[in-house]
Each structure stands twice: as C-alpha cells, then as structure tokens.
Amino acid sequence: MDAVTVKELYAEKGKYLNQNILVNGWVRTVRSSKTFGFIEINDGTFFLNLQIVYDENLANFQELSRLGAGSAIIAAGMLVKSPGAKQPFELKAESIEVQGLAAPDYPLQKKRHTFEFLRTIAHLRPRTNTFSAVFRIRSVAAYAIHKFFQENGFVHVHTPIITGSDAEGAGDMFRVSTLDFDRIMRNEKGVVDFTKDFFGKETNLTVSGQLEAEAYCMAFNKVYTFGPTFRAENSNTPRHAAEFWMIEPEIAFAGLTENMDLAEAMLKYVVSYVLENTIEEMRFLNSFVDKSLLARLENVMHSDFAHVTYTEAVEILKKSGRQFEYPVEWGVDLQTEHERYITEKHFSKPVFITDYPKEIKAFYMRMNDDGRTVAAMDLLTPGIGELIGGSQREERLDYLEKRMDEMGLNKEDYWWYLDIRKYGGVRHAGFGLGFERLLMYLTGMTNIRDVVSFPRTPKNAEF
RNA sequence: UCCUCGAUAGCUCAACGGUAGAGCAACCGGCUGUUAACCGGUAGGUUGUAGGUUCGAAUCCUACUCGGGGAGCCA
C-alpha cells in the first residue's frame, strides 16, 4: 500500500475517513500514558500535522512511548474522526514502524526557539513550523514569478553566473579563479598575471544580469532573469546577504511608466498567488510572526501604489516638520530614515520614487530632458525599504558614451553593451527585484538570513 | 566598515564583588483522550576566548571572537 500524504487527507477529508491507510513522516511530539499515547507527525507535504493514536496492543508500545521528536516512522491504521478539538481526524494505529530513531540530543524542542539559535542549526530548522512555512512560501513564490512572466510573454534568460565584465558597478565582487594562491604569478610590473588564469582574464561572480538581459531584450522584446547574485560587500544588516536571488525583467519599446506598471502587476500577482496557495502557512505567520501580515498584503493587492518624483519626495520631507538626523537637500541621496518616513508615515503603502539626480544613480539610466535627473525608479515598501530598483535605460549611444566619460568608465570594457545601442537600439526599461526582500515582505520575517536556506553573510558560510 | 547592546546547563533566562539557580529538553518512574499534556524524581557548568584589577570575579577593566539592533553600501 502506498503512503497517503497529509496534504491529501486534508484536501479530501471524506475520501479517506474510516479507510485503512498508510502514512509516513517525522515525529513532532509524543504524549504517552500508561496504556496509550499520541504521536504527532509531519510528513512534509502539508503545514499541519497528523495525530496518531496508539495503544498497548501494539507490539512495540514501549518503544513508541519513548520515541523522541525528530524520529521517522511509518504508521498504518484507520483514519477516524477525532474527538479532540484541535484536529478533524486522526489515525488509529494498527502498526507503527520506526524507520529512523532521533538521538536524545535532538536540538529542536516543542517550545519556541529563537531565530538566532535556529540559524546555528540551519540543517534542522526546516523541520520547525516557521521555517516550514517560510520555505514552502519561498517555493510557491518562485513558481508564481515564473508563472507571471511566462503567461505574459516573457522569455526567461539564463544570464551567466561567472562574468568577465569587471566593472558592472553594482558592488564589490567575488573573484573566480583557478590560480594557485600560494604561488601567484606576477608580470614584470608586479601585477597578478590573469592571462595564466582559467579564462585568461579576470573573472568574478555576477552582481547583476542586467547588461546581458538588455542584449536579449533587443532580441525577444520581453525577457527576465531569475538567478543567484553575489555581492562581496561587508554588509552586516538584516536586509543584505552575500548570495541572494534576483529577478530582473527587461522590456523593449517601453519606458519608465510601463516599467512601474509591470513591477506593480507582478507584485500583486505574486502576493495573491501566495495567499491563494499557502493560506495555512500565511495564517500561521500572521499569528506567530507578524500580526499585521495578512492585513498588509490585502492592502497591497487592493491599493494603487503611490508615485512621487525624487524632487516631490524632498519637498514632502522638508514640509514634514520632522527633525531628521541627516538633513534633506536636493541632490543628496535619501537616507533610510527619509525612505521610511515617505513609505511608512506619509503614504503607508508601497511608493515609487522616480527621476533621481543623475549624480546618485548608475551610468546606464536614461537622461531626462531637464539634463539633471535620470529616469530611475525605486519601489519603497513599509518595513522592508527598497524592494525594487530600476530605470529606463539610456538607448541613445551618444548620451550613453558621454555619461560613461563623465563617470570615468572605460568604454572598451563595455563594447558589446554599446553595440546594443548601435544596432537597432530602442527605448527599453527594466528593474531588479531582490527575491529574499520580497519573501521578507510576504512572510513578515525581519531578517534575510531567515528566508534563505543556508545563508551566506560576512564570516558565515557554515553548511 | 562604524555606532550600540549582548554572550551563564542542550534551549530560554536568573544571580550584578562573597559557595552558580529556575523552567523546558534529556534520563527514570507515575498517569485511560492528550494536544507547548500533566505529576514526582535524577543528572547536567573551567559563566565565549585571552589577559588584567582584587584577599576573592559570572559580576569591574582591556583586547579578541561570535551574535542582535542601528548606520553606510544596496536588492
């Protein structure tokens, strides 16, 4: 007999009632009396557990009463209505086979653990309620993103993880090399000789797939990337990881407005898909992790995101009467405290801020007609901060080259990127969405380390 | 990287210059419907590391390591 999953039991409550079934899973808790006891198992298919009732008629009754949390079992018996209030049904066991015993020093207790402690046992934490919820939601959210783009005519591009462009400008990079670090070859100038390296040049892990995505955008019209991204910044915050996943759509024959509409539609789609498909997990997180989670997500689905220009945002902050630690001045980048005021206090919902001064944004962003701002957009969200950063790209070759000169970039390094403008370049735009930041928003988890299976942060690559 | 707070039993915490404790977990026993089960008992510690002050340090000081929060960088 094949094992029935707990997910199926809940999906078709009537079908299995008073039937003999087989289930398997891992013990969450055992409550034993003299002649009978209860075992709750989680089989990994569903957020909720199944209660198994066993009694002294089972040959291994003594063994079962001593069973520790974490052990793996296979149980056979009849599914019956449960007299208890906390579950609709339970399994009246006729036999329970212990498949894998958990040693008594199993570190997960029935009581609540701190997230800090659970990070030290990242290999066991998916067995807890919270992480079970978070990582099932992560899986469903990733699927929702692919589904949204695929159903809207986007082509998924796998951009390279190892990159040869050494000046992507989005942050410090991790070097990729096969050189023998104990015997580094240097040329006559004393500089490391990368011609001896695997690729014959300096290579790094990607910090963004955007430049490559732009190339494919000029062939497929609408593309997106969804892959790992690496930043070697020494960032010690709850919102940064050295390895994270990023979604980067790129659309042709489109500008900043279409770009923002796309971002808003995608976010709303993912939120509603996750709410529809992981409601047990969302309810759990709403009661144990963030009591305002469901209300906030409902609000996101049903409200239009706010739009302000950088210039307007500066005015709002100046008129707020607030005393900020860093004074607001046009031309200076917005501080976290400013962003929080705008999105949390002033609008209380996600806000697009557009048209930033060119000096504080990347070289590839399209120059506006005023000559001092660029067609950039950041999406700020309450609690998370910057969730999306994007722009309309500079498609005019002469403008782009002028901007690169001003910023001291070496145009030879970007020859193929410039070629995109040279051969049929058109208006286009795109953005980068940090997948983990989206997950924090979707789950209410406040530390990025708790939405990544085995997080990589400065001084942390155990597991 | 900077600022700030912290590190005591497997976990969560107490003891704040004078013999290191509790709850939970573990282990042993009891209990006929439990569900953070309950009741009784047992065991569990070089107080993050290295120095220093003191008759005496978990407690005060210094450095380091690791962790939380804030800032910067950004997604």
Image: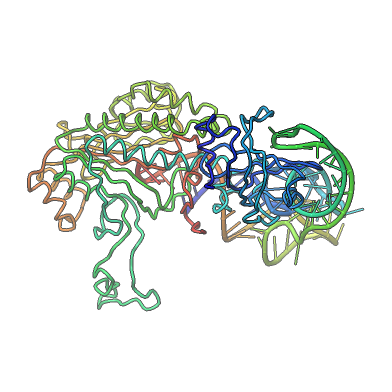
Residue at (39% x, 25% y) in the render: A300
Q: Quadrant of residue A123?
A: bottom right
- Please state the total of marks drawn on the protein image: 0
Residue at (68% x, 57% y) in the render: A103
Pick the residue in front: A238 or A323.
A238
Q: Is residue A421 positioned above or below B55 on the image?
A: above
Q: Position of residue A360 (x, y in %)?
A: 28, 41
Q: Position of residue A380 (x, y in %)?
A: 37, 32
Pick the residue in front: A193 or A11.
A11
Colour style of the rendered protein structure? rainbow
Q: Is residue A303 positioned above or below A180 on the image?
A: above
Residue at (25% x, 60% y) in the render: A164
Pick the residue in front: A84 or A273.
A84
Q: Quadrant of residue A390?
A: top left
Left or right: B35, with A323 as reference point: right
Q: Position of residue A97 (x, y in %)?
A: 65, 52
Residue at (56% x, 50% y) in the render: A119
Q: Is residue A345 positioned above or below A178 on the image?
A: above
